[in-house]
Image (cartoon, coloured by chain):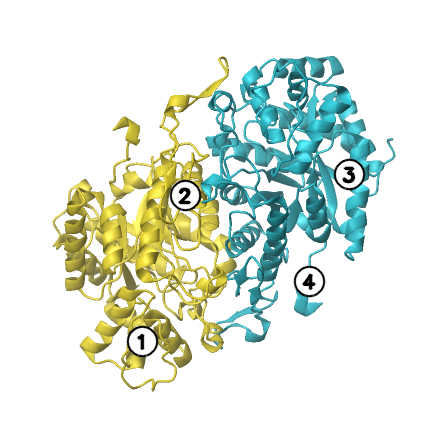
Chain colours: A cyan, B yellow
Amino acid sequence: MTVPHSPGKQLALGAFLMQTGHHIAGWRHPGAQADAGSNFAHYVELARQAEAAKFDAIFISDSVGVRNRDIASLSRTARSDQFEPLTLLSALAAVTAKIGLIATASTSFNEPYNIARKFASLDQISGGRAGWNLVTSSGDGEAENFNLVKHLDHALRYERAAEFHQVVTGLWDSWEDDAFVRDKESGQYFQPEKLHVLNHKGKHFAVRGPLNVARSPQGRPVIVQAGASDAGRDLAARTAEVVFVAHQTFDEARSFYADIKHRAAAYGRAPDEIRIMPGIFPVVAPTRAEAQEKFRALQELIPTVVGVGLLSQMVSFDLSPFPVDGPLPELPPTNGAKSRQQLMVDLARREGLSIRETYLRIAGARGHQQVVGAPADIADLLESWFRDGGADGFNIMSPAHPAGLRDFIELVLPELRRRGLFRNEYQGSTLREHLGLRRPPHPAAR
Amino acid sequence: MTVPHSPGKQLALGAFLMQTGHHIAGWRHPGAQADAGSNFAHYVELARQAEAAKFDAIFISDSVGVRNRDIASLSRTARSDQFEPLTLLSALAAVTAKIGLIATASTSFNEPYNIARKFASLDQISGGRAGWNLVTSSGDGEAENFNLVKHLDHALRYERAAEFHQVVTGLWDSWEDDAFVRDKESGQYFQPEKLHVLNHKGKHFAVRGPLNVARSPQGRPVIVQAGASDAGRDLAARTAEVVFVAHQTFDEARSFYADIKHRAAAYGRAPDEIRIMPGIFPVVAPTRAEAQEKFRALQELIPTVVGVGLLSQMVSFDLSPFPVDGPLPELPPTNGAKSRQQLMVDLARREGLSIRETYLRIAGARGHQQVVGAPADIADLLESWFRDGGADGFNIMSPAHPAGLRDFIELVLPELRRRGLFRNEYQGSTLREHLGLRRPPHPAAR
């Protein structure tokens, strides 16, 4: 287990920065910044810590609405105020130098021209550190903020997402890399033959172009996706460069990993064109006993109404009428996040859990892998998933910020470095370079 | 003319940062950063200079497309690459502390929920320095990037804009100022009775809310508008806090100023709830002769194709088939920027100008007031407009950046300060405080 890897075979690590932290009661932890959702200085501190620790990227999730309509539950969680991710990451770009910046943006309620511009701008501002986590929206309370009473059907959402991706990447190639000569003497600003007008006309979008942003330092910002349903996997295999995913077991992880790389091959892509990075929820302390005590204290901070509210949202179904110590009821098929609902049902059924037991199991990791232990325990899990075909890296979802990220950096990273699994210094300066992803050449140069 | 004003009666000044500068050939000037449209460090320098000089705000214009379809002209101007304004200003927020940050965003091709979030986030990130320049889109090459073959009709655009404004400001009031208590002990994150769900259902938008951003430091970001048509003036009188406008003569300025404040009164608003800030294009040098020489050198850098292309865009009509030394032809009514077309026609007719003479007259100021002279000449003009009811302040549109902004700061500001017309230090720290605009109380607190 401790044989050093070659530099090319190291973990990719993302710091998943969800306001006060990933545990549903994390904001109540003494080490949490409770006002994180409105506190920019907090994010500056986190981003700088993650950069000093040489993380590949920070990762900002998103929801275009408050995630829960049950006020009793919502008013006891830190889930109703957050920065808009692109605004936040643009600001963080100015106070960091190396770390990647991955922002979530929905294909459901945006226009591709606007999204293409913003990420291209972020890539310019950051010197090549932008990543776009392309999602379709499915959460409660989102569609109604956008002139709809409910979300588009799951299949249609993914169809729209695929075309959206096509338009955005096409717009990013509006200009060849050397199109802008800006010759003051001759007065030539760009070379006309290096401008490519997209002229996209599809089922969901008609977008002429060109984009009014030069080709960005990375060629194209990195495409990240998190869909795990069949439609989601297919889109990821075709288009994603990083896949962010939730697993409960190593078998799930290995099977998913093999499936995505297999599907990608069918689209003519090489396995190393996609980095698969499951989320990991680590509760770490110098000893296993201390870690367990830390986790127990967090779990005790969850009011029942909050736990039931969280699980209801995860399965897209209101569980509040059901006995909390009874089993998870049969659930109707959802038009929401299908794979997330299935993950919850599988977990409860597999282990025979009640509603309360189920929400306690997901209150921290929310469907992702949870690991509570000493530094070597965490490192063992990451290493085994990495070496045995379950992951190319991980998104670290600390229970409470800033304390949890600091714990991971101080306790786990030294152990990963001892094992040769994580970098000591950045070798490059763009997100693509950190992840070992090639810079896509402009189509005209291929 | 040199009686010092009281501190409450000083000019508001915005630095209008249009990439390489405001003159159409400004990018070719030796003092221009030709790659400004992709050079974030350039903007950092400009923003810091403007802040050190105590400008009220920097102002970023926008177009959601390249502004000109004629490649011969476009390829000789610096108008095809620019940062998306909100991305840029968020990044600049992180490296400045006091100066206001006004970004343009269109109501034509965005969703109000997204715009409300982004500006609220920028206001949080910047500590209360955000302003939204609310525009309707009318430029060439914009509609076709958003699934349309042409823009909405002028009247409908403004109707949509008014409802858009209503939704955005309503969303900004989703939470009372003290809604978020974040009490770790009790587990109460917010007070439910201080949450206000918008439930907007209108002709153009249905938006439930609430916004997932806390009420921002300024209560609401500052609303800026630039429409000068009848519909534009009406919207501004009802909703704007800053009006950005183009005038060719003092009479126009005084008449517009009186009209807006009169219309505002009809909507129950006090005159000092609106700051009117015309654009000014200054070419300044230590002596009048040097300034004229500087301007002449800039004008000589304009190729004919670029001048005709610029004027064509300003009047929303292709002038290239017409003799450049002949008169401006009769123009059909435009669905584009009506007031801008009228401004050009009035100018050409009033002074009997040819197409070439007209484009030379607008190549720098683009319809705004142009003043070429020594520092006292510029100061005289600003002071007379300010004292005689034509303006509450100005947007300074330097010919080339960074040189032009620096010239204004070094040559004109000392003269304005000598006359007591401009601040030596910021008195407050938000854009509202700089402009002397009150922080709007939450409706529930009124």
Q: Residues within 10 Å of mark 4 (few under 14, many from 20)?
A: some
- Compared to residue B347, the image places residue A34 above or below, namely above
Asked if labels 1 and 3 touch by Cβ distance under 8 angstroms, the answer is no
Q: Residues within 10 Å of mark 1 (few under 14, many from 20)?
A: many
Q: Chain of mark 2?
A: B
User: Which label sits in the foreground, 3 or 1?
Assistant: 3
Asked if labels 4 and 2 touch by Cβ distance under 8 angstroms, the answer is no
Spatial separation of the CA atoms under disc 1 and disc 2: 46 Å
Q: Chain of mark 4?
A: A
Q: Chain of mark 3?
A: A
Give the residue at mark 3.
A391
Q: Are marks 3 and 1 on the same chain?
A: no
Q: Are marks 3 and 2 on the same chain?
A: no
Give the residue at mark 1.
B360
Give the residue at mark 2.
B206
What amino acid is labelled 1 in the image?
Leu
Give the residue at mark 4.
A441
Q: Please indicate whether residue A190 sits to the left or right of residue B100 in the image.
A: right
